[in-house]
Image (cartoon, rainbow, N blue to C red):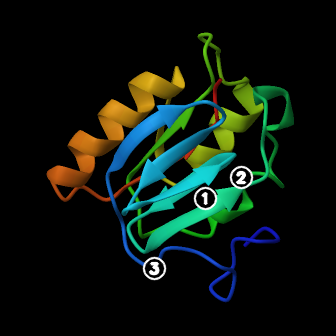
Amino acid sequence: MAAGTGPDAKHLPIPAPIEAYGNGGFRFGGMSHRGSLLCFPDGIWAWSVISVTELSEASLASVFAHTGAIDVFLIGAGSDPWVLPAHLRALFRERGISVDVMTTGAAVRTYNILLAEQRRAGVGLIAVD
């Protein structure tokens, strides 16, 4: 896993719906966090990505470490729509993970639905103002 998102890194060790987003952060699990997030079936971690321009195999390493634990991964790309480059989409396909990119707000709403349905999903949420 990428630095800061390993099993020993500080995190919420359970999945939780995202209650609010904006002002550069998120509210979930009765707490708030400033910055971006990675959410998986086994918990929620801080994510150092602040822009889609930082998405790379390295910044997605924690996602790929969850291969087998997730079927779907959403990317909340901030305020503006964005298209995932073909080389990154191929990395997901190689691992059998379906990936969708949308605005952060849409990703929050979609993730919350998938979580309520107990789907094997993860999301990378880039914080928005």
Q: For mark 3, does the 10 Å Cα neighbourhood hold few (<14), some (14 to 19), or many (20 or more) residues?
A: few
- Mark 3 or 1: in front is 3
Mark sitting on residue 63:
1
Rendered location of residue 17, percent (x, y): 32, 52
Q: Earlier in the sequence, mark 3 or mark 1?
A: 3
**Distance from label 3 to label 2 (Cα)?**
19 Å
> Do the numbered discs 3 and 1 sit on residues whose CB atoms are within 8 Å?
no
Q: For mark 1, does the 10 Å Cα neighbourhood hold few (<14), some (14 to 19), or many (20 or more) residues?
A: many
Of 11 and 55, which appears nearest the observer?
11
Q: Report helix, strand or loop for mark 1.
A: helix
* Residue at 62%, 10% in the rendered image: 80
* Quarter residue 90 falls in: top right
One can see residue 67 in this view? no
**Distance from label 3 to label 1 (Cα)?**
16 Å
Rendered location of residue 85, percent (x, y): 73, 24
> Is residue 83 shown above or below 76?
above
Q: For mark 2, does the 10 Å Cα neighbourhood hold few (<14), some (14 to 19), or many (20 or more) residues?
A: many
Mark sitting on residue 13:
3
> Do the numbered discs 1 and 2 sit on residues whose CB atoms are within 8 Å?
yes
Q: Amino acid at mark 1?
A: Val
Q: Report helix, strand or loop for mark 3.
A: loop
Rendered location of residue 58, percent (x, y): 84, 55
- Quadrant of image for the C terminus: top right
Residue found at the far top of this picture = 80
* Residue at 34%, 61% in the rendered image: 16
Q: Which residue was labeled with disc 2?
A: 60
Q: Is 119 left, or right, of 123 in this rendering? A: left
Q: Amino acid at mark 2?
A: Leu
> Is residue 70 shown above or below 5?
above
One can see residue 91 in this view? yes
Q: Amino acid at mark 3?
A: Pro
